[in-house]
Amino acid sequence: MLDPETNLTIAAKILKKNFQTTDNFILAIGRFHSWNEKKAYRYGQHVKEIYSFLKKTIKQKEIHKNVT
């Protein structure tokens, strides 16, 4: 599993299946980690928080880049 392309392909297939099991975005992402609902939701929420942080950071860097 050291091939990035293979890893991404497999991850995409797993996520696609997960999204077919629920309309809840957080839960679908969390099921990548665990099918235990509590654990899945906690993991999905953590992923969402990281995504939000990265999105905010990138946006701030873009604003700073345009100002300077």
Image (spheres, helix red, strand yellow):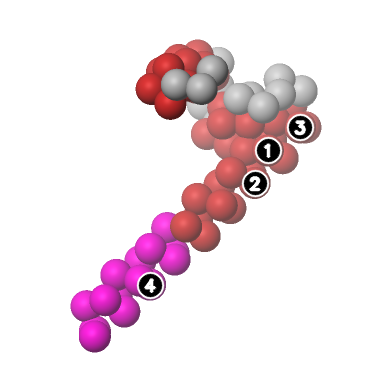
Residue 26 at x, y = what percent? 58, 36
Query: Is label 4 in a helix, a strand or a loop?
Result: helix
Instruction: Give whichever of discs 2 and 3 has the lower sequence position.
Output: 3
**Mark 2 and mark 3 residues within 8 Å of each other at the beta carbon:** no
Which disc, if any, is residue 28? none
Question: How far is disc 1 from disc 3 in space, using C-alphas?
Answer: 6 Å
Residue at image location 35% in from the left, 71% down from the top: 61
Question: What mark, if any, has residue 46 been given in the picture?
Answer: 2
Q: Residues within 10 Å of mark 3 (few under 14, many from 20)?
A: some
Q: Which residue is mark 1?
A: 43
Tag 1–tag 3 contact (CB < 8 Å) = yes
Q: Is residue 21 left or right of residue 39?
A: left
Residue 27 seen:
no
Q: Is residue 27 magenta?
A: no
Q: Which residue is mark 3?
A: 39
Q: Residue at x 47, y 57 (%)?
A: 54
Q: Find the magenta span and give its range.
A: 55-68
Residue at which label 4 appears: 60
Residue furthest front as drawn: 2
Of labels 4 and 3, earlier in sequence is 3
Q: Quadrant of the N terminus?
A: top right
Q: Residue at x 62, y 38 (%)?
A: 44
* Sequence order check, earlier mark of 4 and 2: 2
